[in-house]
Image (cartoon, rainbow, N blue to C red):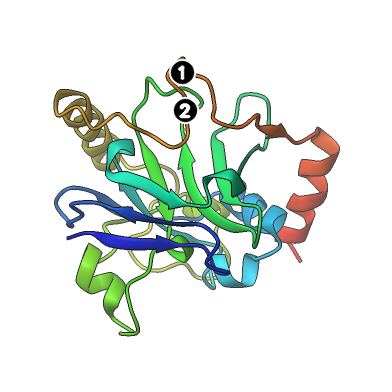
Amino acid sequence: MDIPLRCTCGAVKGVAREVSPRRGTRVVCMCIDCQTYAQFLGRADEILDAHGGTDIFQLAPGQLEIQQGADRLRCVRLSAKGAMRWYADCCKTPVGNTAPSPRIPFVGVPHLFMDHGASPDGRERDLGPVRFRVQAEDGHGEVPPGSHPRFPPRLLARTLFFLLRTRLTGLARPTPFWDDRGQPSVTPLVLSKAERAELRQRCER
């Protein structure tokens, strides 16, 4: 199915095309970087669950289309070599996480940007249950059973297969995050060590 995408204020809208539980992977990531990013956006209470996890659905870049408000997209990196984290500057809604290069065709879309309608079980209906809970060593409290302390081999194998399939099916492009020269569509903001440390302290409060 096609799933509408929208930031909280509605200035940025788009669509995730041909989505199904078999064509993507639903993951909850509890890593300190995802928690730091939520603090950077100032929306940790809405983005993170009780354990510090972010509910993310992994898509091929070519499945995601921004139809309105592309000029509102911004990008931040928590370090010079960190992941590219895209968000809507208008309301600080997380839009997608990508690798530092378009040669790794992958985007993880946080739940706050996906519109599953008014039904409380809409996300599970559209995307299926959470397949993996990862980076539990950074999680808060008693994490759910089956959580992996880091990154399970099964998810790594699934991700490698996903990347290969994306290349073979031509779904690496088009992408709203990179231009035709392979450069980011907007210049990323790279946080300093001091900025990152201050945000991480908030994760512990």
Where residue 107 appears, as percent x and y from the top left, is 39, 41
Q: Which SS class for mark 1?
A: loop
Q: What amino acid is at disc 2?
A: Trp
Measured as percent of width and height from the top left, residue 8 is found at 55, 69
| Closest to the observer, 17 or 151 | 17
Query: In this picture, is 76 found above or below 50?
Result: above
Question: Is residue 183 rendered to the left or right of residue 154?
Answer: right
User: Is 73 situated above or below 182?
Assistant: below
**123 to 138, vertically: above or below:** below
At 37% from the left and 69% from the top, the residue drawn is 115
Outermost residue on the bottom side: it is 119
Q: Quadrant of the N terminus?
A: bottom left
Q: Determine whether label 1 and label 2 are within 8 Å by CB.
A: yes
Residue annotated with mark 2? 178
Q: Please provide percent x and percent y for residue 15.
A: 33, 55
Q: Nearer the viewer, residue 100 or 74?
A: 74
Mark 1: amino acid: Gly
Crowd around label 2: few <14 · some 14–19 · many ≥20 (10 Å): some
Q: Position of residue 123 (x, y in %)?
A: 30, 71
Q: Which residue lies under the disc numbered 1?
A: 182
Q: Quadrant of residue 63?
A: top left
Relative to residue 133, is residue 92 drawn left or right?
right
Q: Residue at x 40, y 46 (%)?
A: 108
Which residue is depicted at the point 75% across and 36% down?
Answer: 191
Spatial distance from mark 1 to mark 2, Cα to Cα?
6 Å
Which residue sits furthest front? 68
Classify mark 2: helix, strand or loop.
Answer: loop
Residue at (40%, 51%) from the top-left corner?
Answer: 67
Viewer-nearest residue: 176 or 114 = 176
Image quadrant containing the C terminus:
bottom right
